Structure formats: structure tokens, C-alpha cells
Amino acid sequence: MIKKAIIISFLIINLTSCIGYYDLKGMDPSLNQTVGHKVDSDIAIKKGEACITSVLLLFAFGDSSIEKAKREGYIKKITSVETSYKHFLLYIPVFQRGCTVVRGI
């Protein structure tokens, strides 16, 4: 009985530790999060975007790297980087989309 309780406790702790604090935003069916990073004070004229799509956290398609977004926007000097994530179906990440937006000159 004690062995079963220890195993169940271990599983609960490990499975719930994958959910970050910022992912718990209430009962919104579409959980969104955006993080921006200011790199330089220059005015951004160009914008490039690169996205990745994940299904069931097992299959990922695309490239959301800063370099890819920089190439897409024909940017030579980066002034800011913004990353956004969209989750669908509450806390179960069945479908997730992450995009990196790079602004620059």
C-alpha cells in the first residue's frame, strides 16, 4: 500500500512539474504568451517572422530561430526580438504554435 502511494505521488509530482507558472492563465481555451526582448535603441524598419508548430509535443514542424526570422525580413541589424506562444485546448498542449518576430534595419 505504501509502495503504491509513493509511486502515485512520484507520478503526480513529475507530471505536474512540466506545467510552468506562466502557462496557468485560467480557463481560457486559447492560452497565449508573448515575451519581448529589446536589443538596441535603433528604430526598426523591417520585420521578419519565423514560426514552429507542435502537435501533442511529439511532432514539430518549422523553424522559429532568430536567424530564420532575420533572413525572412532581410534584416542586417537586429533591434528587438519577440517570442509568442499559443496553446489550444486548455492545459493540454495538443496544438502549440511558437513564433519569433525580429525587427531591425
Image: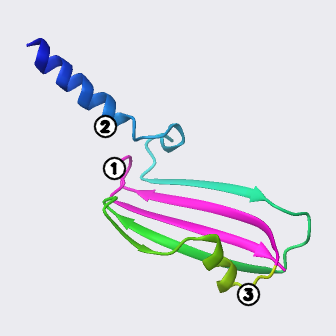
Q: Residues within 10 Å of mark 3 (few under 14, many from 20)?
A: some
Q: Assign a secondary structure to mark 2.
A: helix
x then y, percent, for residue 23 = 49, 44
Contact? badges 3 and 1 (CB < 8 Å): no
> Dividing the picture into quarters, in which one does residue 12 lie?
top left
Q: Residues within 10 Å of mark 1 (few under 14, many from 20)?
A: few
- Colour mode? rainbow
- Identify residue type, mark 2: Leu
x then y, percent, for residue 27 = 43, 43
x then y, percent, for residue 85 = 53, 59
Horizontal side of residue 65 vs 95, given as left or right: right
Residue picked out by circle 2: 15
Q: Assign a secondary structure to mark 3.
A: loop
- Between disc 3 and disc 1, whose residue precedes? 3
x then y, percent, for residue 98 = 52, 64
Q: As rendered, which of 80 and 22 lies closer to the eye?
A: 80
- Identify residue type, mark 3: Tyr
Residue picked out by circle 3: 74
On residue 92, the disc is 1
User: What is the C-alpha distance between the residues marked 2 and 1?
Assistant: 12 Å
Horizontal side of residue 62 vs 3, given as left or right: right
**Which portion, as a residue range, is magenta?**
77-105
- Between disc 2 and disc 3, whose residue precedes? 2
